Amino acid sequence: MAAAATMTERRKQIPAYMKAVSGSLGGVVEACCLQPIDVIKTRLQLDRVGAYKGITHCGSTVVRTEGVRALWKGLTPFATHLTLKYTLRMGSNAMFQTAFKDSETGKVSNRGRLLSGFGAGVLEALAIVTPFEVVKIRLQQQKGLSPELFKYKGPIHCARTIVREESILGLWSGAAPTVMRNGTNQAVMFTAKNAFDVLLWNKHEGDGKVLQPWQSMISGFLAGTAGPFCTGPFDVVKTRLMAQTRDGEGGVRYKGMVHAIRTIYAEEGLVALWRGLLPRLMRIPPGQAIMWAVADQVTGLYEMRYLQNAPL
């Protein structure tokens, strides 16, 4: 009887593929809404001479000198990368959590959630995030109104050029800080999102209760606030490593993650390691709010239809 009850409970868990589908849909919506903030963040992080005075000045300068469409530069790789990233993130996190569940109670401890989130973050960083962000950042750093003068003509041309000039490994420039950033972000985010759902709305996975979109947005927004503070230096270093190209002698300015941190600190000060923090806070928490509002509706509808009154 106990074994049968356990099997029934496991069958009533939301399957990983549904988590993956919900994440992909949320990623599309988030990308379209928040791409301009990501462009501004990238420009601020690459600004070593103080050309931009802040978020508003950066955005207005881009619009004035390059047109409003420039705020959506890199949207194709950004949207594609977000969709694939959330698909992998949500699906792999669900699989990791299944592995960390207590065999008797079927529940996941906070330690298990942290490890599951970190594992999902590392996996997405290596498989998807790094190469897509390299292409996105190379496109975003191009300035001007004449596309014919740009080195990179589009996402595919950019990727091909990087492979030709820097080898296939060029698409994984900045992989180390990206792994650290994404692993830490997802460990915190998944744990916090579950905690806020339980604390604020008494929502437990599998209970058949569907959160209202505004409730999901509040939980997602709060869960997305801690990551940028913890991972700011990794994000700045990631951007610098991804943006740099080899000089005429084949050399690069930053030799790796640790060297980049030391160089930025020595030349630009400690604060420079958190450059772009405000636009990150303007993008990541709202992005998580949008993504979770969509994802929770998808999984919530699944719960209502298939998991009504399922045990925790």
Image: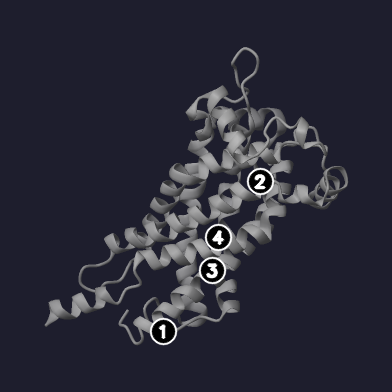
Rendering coords of residue 106 (x, y %): 26, 72
Kindly identify the residue that appears in the image at 62 percent across and 42 percent down: 136
- CA separation in Å, label 2 and label 1: 38 Å
Which amino acid type corresponds to the residue marked 4 in the rendered image? Answer: Gly
Q: Secondary structure at mark 4?
A: helix
Q: Which numbered disc flags the more N-terminal residue, 2 or 1? A: 2
Q: Is residue 162 above or below residue 109?
A: above
Name the foreground residue: 137 vs 283: 137
Q: CA distance from mark 2 to mark 4?
A: 15 Å
Dot label at residue 74: 2
Residue 283 seen in the current view? yes
Residue designated by label 4:
27
Which residue sits at x=25%, y=73%? 10
Image quadrant assignment for residue 49: top right
**Colour option used:** one colour
Amino acid type shown at disc 2? Gly
The dot on residue 292 is: 3
Q: Earlier in the sequence, mark 2 or mark 3?
A: 2
Q: Position of residue 204 (x, y in %)?
A: 40, 78
* 273 is higher (above) or lower (below) than 168: below
Mark 4 and mark 3 in contact? Answer it, CB < 8 Å: no
Packing grade of label 2 (10 A; few <14, some 14-19, many >=20) is many
Q: Alpha-carbon neighbours of circle 4 within 10 Å: few (<14), some, or many (≥20)?
A: many
Labelled pair 2, 3 in contact (Cβ < 8 Å)? no
For the residues labelled 1 and 4, say whether their Cβ atoms are less than 8 Å apart. no
The residue at which mark 1 appears reads as 304
Q: CA distance from mark 1 to mark 3?
A: 17 Å
SS at mark 1?
A: helix
